[in-house]
DNA sequence: CTGAAAGCGCTTACAG
DNA sequence: CTGAAAGCGCTTACAG
């Protein structure tokens, strides 16, 4: 075993009968090498299968061309989709990606993770963990900037931090305004867990839309879910009890909306003639719910891309490779996707949903 | 800018008035350090916020404690769930994870990716890309073993390679046997893309079950999908036309099953009284489809964990840290999850699906 | 118990 | 156009 040996520049130099500097010049495409020398070296390189060590280069250049991403909840559509965007742009900009998943995003020991990332010389960090409860407390007193450029996803803007978020509040407003525009007047909400910043933002949007329309937005119209379809089911049952005049519901994600739809089918006492339903996320499945779900689409891939893009600019500025840029936080706008679930009498509809 | 400076061992040594060796001994918990020296050094370390460079250590030890994972399709449940398992076990074993996503898993230039991973000194690679068409051709002629330990997920076993897979064939059989046991006799299938090895395995299981029961498994019972709900819809429509006596259907994943369910609702000409439906994957949503979907659950987290576990053993053997182990390929067994969609007359059911 | 020397794989001045 | 020397941050023998 372990006949596995890394070919080094020294071996290449030796085999080609030149110094390591010359090999280095060839690798890095420097012009100051005699054409035949270059050719000879190149031949030896491909013959030996020489691969320059990025690790050694990191040590010299004090730059690893590696980014660290800290994420969580990859079993949900939002986080995994965001990660795809992050990875894509990371690669496009020539970086490698170190992945860290939190299993307890509210409580996990953040210190240890950052330390590991720093010991690996990452050039920057993407903090893709949702803001939950007090899980930003570790930011207090820390002077992160002095350690490494870092960009945050989906959290409340804070002075001194660069944050890229979806405008969840706007999303909640879009969903609710749509329902109002279609004649619904008694609109309940199943929120996400309310210690999530994003959940509160969506609820805020819901409330603003109702108030702007002069409609009630009372406590009995609100139920808290936990993003799961099961909590959507519990939510709708509770709402039916405490808000019987309800004629529409904004579920804060598509899974919970799905739970609502199934429950309506199962109960089939009062509806389903006239309960409007809007979700949030536009997961690929939602177009095939029964009825097809009206929902709010978030530009998640774009979110990941822009985060990496900005982080890269911060890094470059740090290395003085680019102009000094002012780094503002950014909000990306979600979009409403209208389908059958928010149109009156969808349950009777059949031509509406027919595809060819 | 760039007042950001990494604290080095030299600075710590200087500040503590000792040599770098002594600092090194303290960091690595060596016993041969005078108690007061140790204390003094430790204090300087935490005061300065010194973080030993994993990069420098990699160079010396010829071991990075980093694994590379090459994956794809993270927007689907299977791949992202598998990644969660991989990351979890990677962390548990003290490794870091370098993530590479392929955007064109059938054609992408694999050489470049492996080269990058090798230049980053990964200790091992997890190849979590499904086997599609000829996308294992690059294995030919390569002596990967000589480069780095590598483990493959979900592909046809090949001599000399270590592979960990879900037993998709068994899964297809489970699904079909279940339908047969519940009285269905004319069972169609919507397969995944047939250039996927996993799709073919699931179809094989379907066929075996039918043949074992003396039931027909003819070409007109088979339609090829592409994993999307939309292709499920197209699939069921085609099947209805070419296999009109069909009374049940095995959709090779839950998304396609969802497309089937919605289409049945939309058409509502012949059924839905009596079409049994079974999916594959057990995505969290499937319990809330209408009707709740019977499906086949794959132990994906476990798949990821076991892959990393085995890879780690291969690495240790390579470094002669452990005994020489014989590395067999492994099949993990999926399990059937029975819900309403495969029980007669589910569409009339309501008490069945009632939850409290 | 402690430290001067050499080296991991590479690159950056510097000298010729 | 080319190479000997020094160094990135750390550790491993080796000597005391």
Image (cartoon, coloured by chain):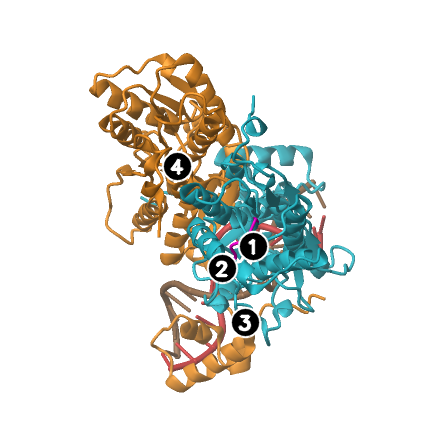
Chain colours: A cyan, B orange, C red, D brown
Residue B290 lies in quadrant: top left
Parent chain of label 4: B
State which mark lies toward you, 1 or 3: 1
Q: Looking at the rendered structure, which numbered label has been put on residue B291?
A: 4
Give the CA separation, mark 4 to mark 3.
45 Å
The residue to which callout 1 is attached is: A188
Q: Which element is circle 3 on? A: helix
Q: Looking at the image, is mark 4 or mark 3 nearer the viewer? A: 4
Q: Chain of mark 3?
A: A
Q: Give the residue at x 54% y 48%.
A: A78
Q: Which SS class for mark 4?
A: loop
Labels 2 and 4 within one chain: no
Give the residues in magenta.
Answer: A243-247
| Residue that label 3 marks | A138
| B214 sits to left or right of B56 | left
From the image, state whether disc 1 or disc 2 is nearer to you. 2
Q: Quote the CA–CA distance across marks 1 and 3.
A: 36 Å
- Location of mark 2 (residue): A242
Q: Are tags 4 and 1 found on a single chain?
A: no
Mark 2 falls on what kind of element? helix
């Amino acid at each position: 075993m372990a006949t596995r040996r890394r070919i080094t520049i020294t071996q290449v130099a030796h085999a080609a009968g030149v110094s390591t500097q010359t090999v280095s010049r060839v690798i890095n495409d420097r012009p100051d090498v005699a054409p035949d020398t270059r050719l000879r070296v190149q031949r030896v390189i491909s013959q030996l299968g020489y691969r320059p060590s990025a690790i050694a280069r990191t040590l010299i250049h004090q730059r690893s061309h590696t980014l660290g991403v800290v994420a969580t909840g990859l079993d949900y559509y939002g986080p995994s989709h965001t990660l795809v965007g992050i990875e894509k742009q990371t690669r496009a900009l020539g970086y490698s990606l170190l992945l860290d998943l939190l299993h307890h995003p509210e409580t996990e020991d953040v210190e240890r993770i950052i330390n590991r990332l720093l010991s690996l010389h990452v050039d920057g960090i993407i903090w893709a963990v949702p803001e939950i409860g007090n899980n930003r407390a570790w930011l207090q007193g820390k002077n992160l900037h002095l350690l490494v450029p870092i960009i945050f996803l989906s959290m409340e803007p804070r002075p001194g931090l660069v944050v890229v978020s979806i405008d969840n509040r706007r999303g909640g407003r879009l969903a609710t305004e749509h329902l109002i525009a279609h004649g619904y007047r008694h609109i309940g909400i199943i929120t996400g867990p309310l210690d999530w910043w994003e959940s509160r933002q969506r609820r805020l949007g819901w409330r603003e839309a109702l108030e702007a329309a002069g409609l009630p937005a009372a406590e009995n119209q609100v139920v808290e879910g936990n993003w799961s379809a099961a909590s959507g089911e519990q939510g709708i049952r509770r709402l039916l009890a405490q808000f019987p005049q309800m004629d529409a519901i904004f579920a804060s994600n598509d899974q919970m909306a799905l739970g609502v739809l199934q429950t309506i089918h199962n109960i089939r006492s009062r509806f389903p003639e006239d309960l409007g339903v809007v979700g949030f996320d536009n997961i690929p499945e939602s177009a095939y719910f029964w009825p097809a779900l009206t929902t709010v689409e978030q530009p998640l891939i774009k979110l990941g891309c822009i985060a990496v893009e900005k982080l890269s600019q911060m890094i470059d500025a740090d290395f003085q490779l680019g102009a000094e840029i002012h780094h503002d936080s950014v909000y990306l706008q979600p979009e409403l996707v209208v389908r059958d679930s928010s149109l009156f009498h969808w349950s009777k509809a059949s031509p509406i949903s027919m595809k060819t």
